[in-house]
Amino acid sequence: MVKQQYITLYQQYAHIIKEKSAPLLNSIRDAAFKRFEELGFPVKRDKDYEYIDIQSSYDHDFGLNLNRVSLDVDPYKVFTCDVPNIQSYLCFIVNDTFYANPEPKISLPKGVIVASLNEICTTHPDLVKPYLFKNMDWENDPNQAFNVTFAQDGLFIYVPKNVVVDVPIQLVNLMHGNDDLLAVNHNLIIVEEGASVKLLVCDHASNEKKYLANRLTEIFVGKNASYEHYKIENTHNQTMNLGTVLVHQDDDSRFLSNTLTLHNGITRNNITVHVDGQNAEAIVGGLAIGDKTQKIDNYVSMNHLKPNSTSLQLFKYILDDQAKGVFTGKIIIKEDAQKIAAYQTCKTICLTNTATINTKPQLEIFADDVKCSHGATVGQLDETALFYLRSRGIPINEAKLLLMYAFVHDVLEHISVDAVKDRIRLLVEKRLRGELSKCNGCVICK
């Protein structure tokens, strides 16, 4: 039984996990384990996991780095980002361990912290304690319970009050090793009142081994603060990414998320936003390009708890061969959350008769003074538009490429970092051509 092997693993090695982790990370570990023991992994009969079998992803003899052994790679020597003029502050998580930048080329403003979560939990527990685990629902979500049970490290970002970080922070999640590996890490991002920061997350794999990552990120966006979160998945067909992003917003805050799945085996992105403030704005977008037998599942829950706020969900899928896409989008508006404007759209192009998409747009509205809409469309390339382009002398493959690129254009326009936007446009174009859209200057990707 898949669940039992991880129960036995924790029972045998819990003392090592705790010994290598800060007390704060251990504070609810046993309680989370007991809850995981009761819940088990999500199965297909669960309504929110009915289309992709998450449990089977764990059914493999993965290695875990419970003893926190340093790996035989210096990520800062083997990785070179080729995004022109990106000017980012670079940091790494190799498997599930944060690696600090020894010689950063970019200086961060005074008071900004980018560090190991395990380290900060030890050195600055008073800074972490008011936030850690506060966004979570581990008592009801088995993926979250599993993460708390096994996570020993992750990324910590702290931006003090009224501090603006002008350059994006770039986090590279690198799966690396000579054996099949499971990585479990927990990230915590705190953006205080009036502060602003952008995070670019890039998922890479160093070889063709079988990898599974369970990564959870808690984000707190303070009053009048701004946070932007960009994630690019660009690995290989043997990689399974289970990502959870949990966001809490205060008054007048702004949150933007853009998740781009260009190449991966199995992807499940859980994004839950609690808009717990007035005059707040939340934008959650995504683009998925799948072929062969890839599976891409995006689950978004937008929760409006206070009045006078807005939200937008915009997801686009292009699926080829036997690829499978899933989109579940919820808008939940509580009784006191009047004067809300919340919109949700998911559009899909299936290039073959064997590609599939399952969409579940949902509204749960308990207030009466709101503006809400949701919609989903599924279709193929417009034959009339294709004929028009071909009649102008454009070859059929280029005509299809133009239509597909026009289809995803509005998702990419939500990227505010020009250098990142230009690079992603190129990666998307290469991917639409059927090429492996790897970073040219990255030793890892070659």
Image: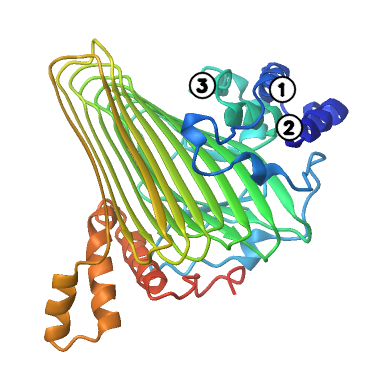
Label 1 environment density (alpha carbons within 10 Å; few <14, some 14–19, many ≥20): some
User: Is residue 112 shown above or below 391?
Assistant: above
How far from the left and from the top, in percent, is residue 40? 67, 27
Splitting the image into 4 quarters, where does residue 344 fall?
top left
Most foreground residue, 312 or 346: 346
Q: Circle 2 is placed at which residue position?
A: 3
Q: Circle 3 is placed at which residue position?
A: 131
- The quadrant the C terminus occupies is bottom right
Mark 2 secondary-structure assignment: helix
> Is the image coloured rainbow, by chain, by secondary structure, or in one colour?
rainbow
Q: Circle 1 is placed at which residue position?
A: 37
Mark 1 secondary-structure assignment: helix
Of the residues tagged 1 and 3, which is closer to the observer? Answer: 1
Residue lying at 74% horizontally and 37% vertically, measured from the top left: 2
Residue lying at 55% horizontally and 20% vertically, measured from the top left: 140
Q: How far apart are the two marked residues, 2 and 3, measured between alpha carbons?
A: 29 Å
User: Is residue 425 shown above or below 162?
Assistant: below
Q: Which amino acid does label 2 sit on?
A: Lys
- The quadrant the N terminus occupies is top right
Q: How far apart are the two marked residues, 1 and 3, measured between alpha carbons?
A: 25 Å
First in sequence: mark 2 vs mark 3 = 2
| Tag 1–tag 2 contact (CB < 8 Å) | yes
How far from the left and from the top, in percent, is residue 420? 36, 60
